[in-house]
């Protein structure tokens, strides 16, 4: 299962749990607290991922990045954004170097 588990699978789980009972689902209880709390948790997990990355502990990076991606999916759910929207935007960006994009913003 873990070899084939993807972010799309987790997105589907988050969508399903969004309509679960709040007492039985962390996802639902977080969504019930509103976008501010969801975004705050995302920020906390981002900071914890940064700390893990700097520490050099690979297992900690895996754990914190997993928390980060889960909480990102909750925020996306709260805002009605789907992974396919992100995929479309990422696909649009292919073919242009990040440095070229940065230069076009600075001089445009
Ligand atoms: N991947 C995750 C996942 N990652 C992290 N977390 C939860 O995120 C929370 C964040 O950790 P913290 O220590 O910051 O939490 P806390 O102190 O309890 O949080 P607050 O009091 O600040 O809100 C923990 O409760 C984790 O269990 C997750 N909760 C759920 N999932 C996935 O979502 C599915 C559905 O979960 P439920 O919605 O709970 O059924 C699960 O089966 C998993 O697949």
Image (tube, rainbow, N blue to C red):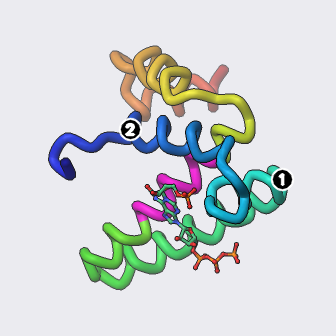
Q: Mark 1 highlights which residue?
A: 34
Q: Secondary structure at mark 1?
A: loop
User: Is residue 2 rendered to the left or right of residue 77?
Assistant: left
Q: Residue at x 64, y 29 (%)?
A: 81
Find residue 46 and report its horizontal and vertical position in percent. 55, 65
Q: Few, some or many C-alpha atoms within 10 Å of disc 2 (few <14, some 14-19, many ≥20)?
A: few
Q: Earlier in the sequence, mark 1 or mark 2?
A: 2
Q: Mark 2 highlights which residue?
A: 9
Image quadrant, ligand 1: bottom right
User: Is residue 12 rendered to the left or right of residue 56?
Assistant: right
Q: Are discs 1 and 2 less than 8 Å apart at CB?
A: no
Magenta span contains residue 69? yes
User: Is residue 89 rendered to the left or right of residue 32?
Assistant: left
Find residue 62 and report its horizontal and vertical position in percent. 32, 67
User: Residue 56 is drawn in which quadrant?
Assistant: bottom left
Which of 51 and 24 lies nearest the eye of the viewer? 24
Instruction: Examine the rendered structure and indicate whether residue 77 appears above or below residue 60.
Output: above
Find residue 8 and report its horizontal and vertical position in percent. 40, 34
Instruction: Examine the rendered structure and indicate whether residue 50 appears above or below residue 56.
Output: above
Magenta span contains residue 106? no
Instruction: Examine the rendered structure and indicate whether residue 56 appears above or below residue 22.
Output: below
Find residue 3 and report its horizontal and vertical position in percent. 15, 47
Q: Secondary structure at mark 2?
A: helix
Kindly tell me whether mark 1's CB lies below 8 Å from ligand 1.
no
Label the magenta part by its dominant secondary structure. helix
> Which portion, as a residue range, is magenta?
65-74
């Amino acid at each position: 299962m873990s070899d084939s588990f993807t972010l799309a699978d987790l997105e589907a789980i988050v969508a399903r749990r969004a309509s679960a009972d709040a007492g039985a689902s962390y996802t639902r209880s977080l969504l019930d607290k509103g976008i501010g709390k969801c975004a705050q948790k995302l920020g906390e997990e981002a900071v914890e991922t940064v700390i893990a990355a700097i520490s050099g502990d690979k297992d900690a990076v895996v754990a914190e990045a997993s928390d980060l991606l889960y909480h990102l999916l909750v925020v996306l759910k709260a805002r009605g954004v789907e992974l396919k929207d992100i995929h479309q935007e990422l696909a649009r960006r292919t073919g242009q170097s990040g440095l070229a994009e940065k230069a076009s913003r600075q001089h445009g």
